[in-house]
């Protein structure tokens, strides 16, 4: 009975390793295929789909690695999954901070431009009012 359980854990550990490697390589292939088949307009769709697939693979590799942690391939899947997930969270945090900084800069530019346009409008309105004959 114990030998069968160990074989099952070895099988699960090997799947953890396969999913870990798949989670690293498949997103690149998915993104390249989508862009190659659908054209450059598909880049906005390809990136989230590829990253999502890789994320799911890494989470599964981590979970299966925990189950098969007695074997080397399970440990690789588990620890590799943790490293990739931590890097993914760090990259998402950096991207979010960059997005927020860009949004703040764009809002500031918009306000400057809005003020400029309002000033020009008021000048044009005054010029028209002065140029009209008085009744």
Image (cartoon, helix red, strand yellow):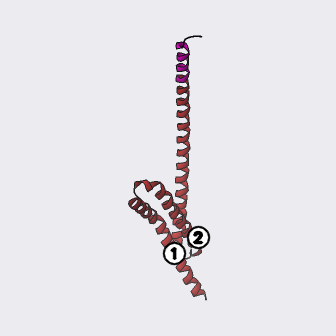
- Quadrant containing the C terminus is top right
What type of secondary structure mainly makes up the magenta span? helix
Estimate the x, y position of residue 123 in percent, counting from the top left: 53, 19
Estimate the x, y position of residue 20 in percent, counting from the top left: 50, 68
The part of the chain drawn in magenta is: 120-135
User: Can residue 71 be seen from the camera position used here?
Assistant: no
- Please identify the quarter of the rendering in which residue 37 is found: bottom left
Residue where numbered disc 2 is placed: 63
User: Can residue 60 be seen from the camera position used here?
Assistant: yes
Q: Residue at x 38, y 60 (%)?
A: 36
Q: Which of these two is toward me, 70 or 126?
A: 126
- Give the secondary structure at mark 1: helix
Estimate the x, y position of residue 6 in percent, counting from the top left: 57, 83
Q: Residue furthest top?
A: 134
Residue where numbered disc 1 is placed: 15
- Cβ–Cβ below 8 Å for labels 1 and 2? no
């Amino acid at each position: 009975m114990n030998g069968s359980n160990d074989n099952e854990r070895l099988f699960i550990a090997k799947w953890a390793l396969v999913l870990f490697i798949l989670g690293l390589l498949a997103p690149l292939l998915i993104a390249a295929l989508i862009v190659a088949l659908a054209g450059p307009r598909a880049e906005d769709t390809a990136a989230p789909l590829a990253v999502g697939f890789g994320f799911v693979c890494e989470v599964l590799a981590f979970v299966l690695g925990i189950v098969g942690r007695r074997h080397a391939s399970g440990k690789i899947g588990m620890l590799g999954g943790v490293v990739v997930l931590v890097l993914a969270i760090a990259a998402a945090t950096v991207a979010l901070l960059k997005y927020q900084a860009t949004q703040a800069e764009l809002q500031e530019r918009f306000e400057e431009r809005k003020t400029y346009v309002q000033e020009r409008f008021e000048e044009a309105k005054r010029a028209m009012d002065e140029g009209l004959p008085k009744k």
